[in-house]
Structure formats: structure tokens, C-alpha cells
Amino acid sequence: MTEMKRRRSFEPGHRLKFMVLVDETPECDRAVHFAVRRAARLTARVVMLAVAEPPETLEWLGVGEAMRAEAEAEVRERLEQLAAAARQAAGVDPEIVVRTGERADEILRLIRDDEDIGFLVLAAAAGTEGPGPLVSSIAGRAAGTFPVPVVIVPGALSEAEISALAG
């Protein structure tokens, strides 16, 4: 793992940020709701990260670039919808970040680059098949070395339950 910058979110000129990974899963909105409610309570900020998967090797005739642009447009649309919901639910205007690459790598890269990110907020799947691959990966294998605390929001919680927990 690359060396991380020291977290500075409570120093003068800095402000705590909750980072949320936005994806296509149905429970993703649970994580966003928790992050924006908690950020509003603490007068913190929210960073919403969406990672577009890079296209397979179709680089000839610009096909790969067109596919990359289409994937980024799709994730940006999802981010904009969730950002509008965040503004309405908690009055928080999230910072939107779109990256292309491997999710885990891009999460770590953004945390490394932004020293105000103090928490990563993820949502666990509500079903019985397990919490989901990203939650399993971070909570299991990398939990002891992850650079910031990870908040895992159960996907089965209602908005009212999340609001009661987040403040």
C-alpha cells in the first residue's frame, strides 16, 4: 500500500469529509443517506466517488475511448441523482468525483490524495448472500491496514433508522 498522508480534517483550514462509494447496488443510497446526515450533524463534507470500470481492450478506432466516455456518463448521472437527494435530505452539497479504474485502487488513491477524508462509508447488502464483495474485501483482508475508519451501513435499515443513528 502506498504511504498515506496524515489526516488533517480537524486542523485550521481543513474540514472533515465522509467519502461514499457510489455504485449500482440498491443499498448504495443507504450509505449516501448515512454520510450526508452525519456530515450535516458535524458540519462536515461529503465526497461521493463513482468508479467506472475501464473497457476491455477495444482501443482501435477510438472504440475504447467512446466506451470509457459512456461508462463515465452513466456513473455521473447516478452521482447527480444521489447528490440531489443529499441536498434535499440534509442540505449537504456533496463533492462529486468520477474515476476510471479498479474500485479498490481508486478508493485508496482518493483517500491518499485528499487528507480531509476521515471516513469511508459503505453499505452492506441486505440479503443473506453476504455483505457484498467490496465490503468483504475491505472489512476482511485489509481492515487492519486501511488508512481511515470504515463505516458499514446495513442495507436493510430504513431512512428513518439511519437518520436516528446519524444524528
Image (spheres, rainbow, N blue to C red):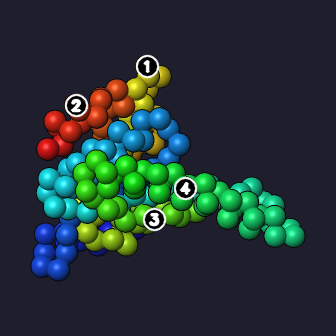
Q: Which numbered tag is attached to residue 152?
A: none
- The image shows residue 132 at horizontal and vertical percentages of 46, 34
Q: Is residue 65 left or right of residue 86?
A: right
Distance in Å between CA atoms under marks 2 and 3: 28 Å
Distance in Å between CA atoms under marks 4 and 3: 12 Å
> Which image quadrant for residue 74?
bottom right
- The image shows residue 154 at horizontal and vertical percentages of 32, 32
Query: For the view shown, which residue lies furthest in the top direction?
Result: 128
Q: Is residue 45 left or right of residue 111?
A: left
Q: Which residue is mark 3?
A: 97
* SS category of the residue bearing label 2: helix
**Residue at point 34%, 26% (across, down):** 156
**Residue at point 51%, 51% (across, down):** 78
* SS category of the residue bearing label 1: loop
Q: Which residue is mark 2?
A: 161
* Amino acid found under the numbered disc labelled 1: Thr
Which residue is nearer to you in this view: 144 or 115?
115
Distance in Å between CA atoms under marks 1 and 4: 29 Å
**Residue at point 50%, 38% (across, down):** 25
Query: For the view shown, which residue lies furthest in the right direction?
Result: 61
* Label 2 crowd (10 A; few <14 / some 14-19 / many >=20): few
Relative to 144, residue 110 above or below = below
Q: Residue 155, can we see it? A: yes
Q: Which residue is mark 1?
A: 128
Q: Which residue is mark 4?
A: 77
Query: For the view shown, which residue lies furthest in the bottom direction?
Result: 13
**Tags 2 and 3 in contact by the CB under 8 Å rule?**
no
* SS category of the residue bearing label 3: strand
* SS category of the residue bearing label 4: helix
* Nearest to N terminus: mark 2 or mark 4: 4
